[in-house]
Each structure stands twice: as structure tokens, then as C-alpha cells.
Amino acid sequence: MRTLRITTPLTDAVIESLRAGQAVLITGRLLTARDAAHKRLVEALARGEKLPVDLRGQVIYYVGPTPAPPGKVIGAAGPTTSGRMDPYTVPLLAQGLRGMIGKGYRSPKVVAALAEYRAVYFVTYGGAGALLARTIKEARVLAYADLGPEAVHEFIVEDFPALVANDIHGGDIYRESDRWRVAR
């Protein structure tokens, strides 16, 4: 497969076209959030509150960026393990979240929810946070600033590299191919 250039927010047509194993370069807006922010978002939903960010069509990158060195937009921005967000993922998909970026496989419940809610899970390079940061052109905190690096940020990215791990058609790079096989 050739590398696809895609933009955010993700549309139905883009999501339908993506297949597990497909390399992509993402340009546009990414939201960031890790465990603590996910917990707050889901707790807010449980209380019937409006979320501090609109998730419709958006992609969340599971990252806790390091502070920006002089002259840089952001410090290292490598992915964190996605499975830690699994308990919070389905309620956020129900709010219109269309994609997530992290590392590692997802639970069967999340994989099934991707098909149900028409969303996709991408993986990116662990251990290469400084290189990934080069694709981030702008960064700002949107919510939960008290969480520091785990706050919800907005990144404007250009050609952010990722691989489709789970698609809406049931494709799963961790289950289907020896090339992507990981120890569980």
C-alpha cells in the first residue's frame, strides 16, 4: 500500500478508505490527552456536563509532551501505551471522536467500538518523540492545564507519520499479520 496523506477532522469517506496496515501522513489538528485527562472527560460526561473540547471528527494523540526547548514549539512528543485509555474510550467515541493515536494493541471492546462508532486507531513510533515533535507546528493547552503534560493540548501537525492499526472493517495489524505480531 502507498502512504496516504490525510487531514483532520476525519471524514466518513477517509475513515471508510483506511485499512489496517496502511501508512498515513496526518496534517491538521490533533488533540492530546492521557490517562488523567481521559478520566476527567469521562467523569464530566457521567455528571451530564459539556466537555471542554468538541470531539466530533477529532483525533486524540495519547501523548504527554515535554516542555519546549528554546526556539521550539514543543519538546519530545512520543506516544504512550494506548491500552491505559481503553476504560475511557467508548464514551468518547460516543461523543464523536473519530481517531486515536498511540502505541500498542487495544482491547476487544475498543476494537468492536471502532466499527460501531466509525472510528480508527493509529499507531506511531514509540521512542522517537523528538522526531515526531518536528511535525508539530503549533501547540497550546485547551483544558485541564493543572495536569501539566497530561493536559488536553491542541497540536497543529504537518505530515505526522502513523500506521492504521485498527480500521472500521475489523482489520487489526496485531491479529492479522506475522509482520505486525507482538507479544501479549
Image: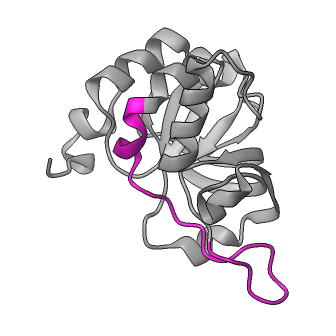
Quadrant for residue 56, please give it: top right
Residue sitting at x 73%, y 73%? 74
Front residue of this view, candidates 49 and 131: 49
Residue sitting at x 27%, y 24%? 108
Residue 181 vs residue 104: left or right? left
Q: Position of residue 51 (x, y in %)?
A: 72, 28
* Residue that extends furthest to the top in the rendered view of this protein: 116
Residue sitting at x 45%, y 14%? 115
Query: Can residue 172 be found in the magenta stretch?
Result: no
Query: Can residue 73 be found in the magenta stretch?
Result: yes
- Magenta residues, dominant SS class: loop
Q: Position of residue 90 (x, y in %)?
A: 47, 21
Front residue of this view, candidates 11 and 22: 11
Residue 94 vs residue 167: left or right? right
Does residue 74 show up? yes
93 shown above or below 157: above
Quadrant for residue 38, please give it: top right
Front residue of this view, candidates 84 and 37: 37
Q: Position of residue 73 (x, y in %)?
A: 80, 73
Residue 26 vs residue 102: left or right? right
Does residue 163 show up? no
12 shown above or below 132: above
Residue sitting at x 49%, y 59%? 79
Q: Which residues are magenta?
A: 66-87
Residue 37 vs residue 12: left or right? left
